[in-house]
Amino acid sequence: DKKDVLPAIERVGGAPVIIKLIEGTQGIGVLLAETVNMAESIIELLQSQKQNVLIQKFVAESKGKDIRAIVVGDRVVAAMRRVAQGQEFRSNVHRGGIAEAVELSQDYIDTAVRATQIMGLTVAGVDMLESASGPQIMEVNSSPGLEGIETCTGLDVAGAIIDYIAAQVDFPEIDVRQRLTVSRGYGVGEIYIPEGSNFVGKTILETQLQEQDVNVLTLYRGAKVIPNPRKDRLLEPEDKLLCFGRMEVMRGMVPAKTRKRRRPKVIDLPESVSGQPPYSDNPELK
């Protein structure tokens, strides 16, 4: 709505801003507004034509460049940098941008994969800007074009997608928690390791979890996820262990201060009308 324009521009850091049509593709309907007044005029014009728009932060230091990463499953199979030409700020190949193959750092790989997962996709084209603070996501495309990135990188991206689909048919992913909680007394649980825990400074092997019929499936350390961690990995404060095993054993490892026990409030029993306790040997009172 018109009343939302100024607050939206302020939220993304002020002018200049990018204005996009919701239905735009291949760079069509992407406009740069240098000032707030210009942004208001552009939006008013577009809305008069029944066009819905969104306002996006303008990342000046990206200098007309962006990264396109193709995510298949849980990995980036191809990536390219698109560079705008001349005075054009849009780097889309369809707008004359030049594409070059690029080797992504782990930050950009993790960002692309995580964005794809958040959107509930298994195949996506993730567009990111190279800002001073690291990768910033512009779009997550559920049906990315492949011609440009295959030509640029020389990689068979379509083949990687087909292989992934075939692998899902031959060896489908399952809900581990659902499958592993079938056995009576066994299940999947998370063990938190607070500061001062006896586990801190020990390896997974030294915790003797396996001897107690508990197997560590995944180690969570901050934002890092370590599946099937090695037995010689040292544990640190704030680690979380996703485990499968005896639920009774895992429940016993919850720190006492985090366990909430319900203590019933003791209420004095009222005396009977006769002045005797309600539960006596008097058969009349019984």
Image (cartoon, rainbow, N blue to C red):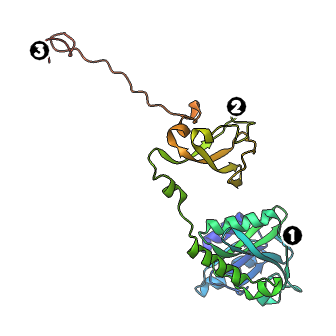
Q: Residues within 10 Å of mark 1 (few under 14, many from 20)?
A: few
C-alpha separation, residue under disc 3 versus residue under disc 1: 91 Å
- Marks 2 & 3, CB-CB < 8 Å contact: no
**Type of amino acid under label 2:** Gly
Q: Quadrant of the N terminus?
A: bottom right
Mark 2 element type? loop
Residue at left offset 21%, top offset 16%:
279
Report the side of 63 relative to 162 (left or right).
right
Q: Which mark is first along the chain, 1 or 3?
A: 1
Q: Is 254 above or below relative to 284?
A: below
Circle 1 residue: 61
**Dividing the picture into quarters, in which one does residue 89 lie?**
bottom right
Report the side of 186 relative to 36 (left or right).
left
Circle 2 residue: 196
Mark 1 element type? helix
Q: Is 250 above or below relative to 90?
A: above
x, y percent for residue 114: 68, 64
**Type of amino acid under label 1:** Glu
x, y percent for residue 128: 76, 71
Residue at left offset 31%, top offset 18%:
268
C-alpha separation, residue under disc 2 versus residue under disc 3: 59 Å
**Dividing the picture into quarters, in which one does residue 20 lie?**
bottom right
Q: Quadrant of the C terminus?
A: top left
In front of the other: 210 or 262: 210
Q: Is 108 above or below relative to 146?
A: above
**Type of amino acid under label 3:** Pro
In front of the other: 86 or 125: 125
Q: Is residue 58 visible?
A: no
The image's mark for residue 283 is 3
x, y percent for residue 12: 72, 66
Q: Which mark is first along the chain, 3 or 2?
A: 2
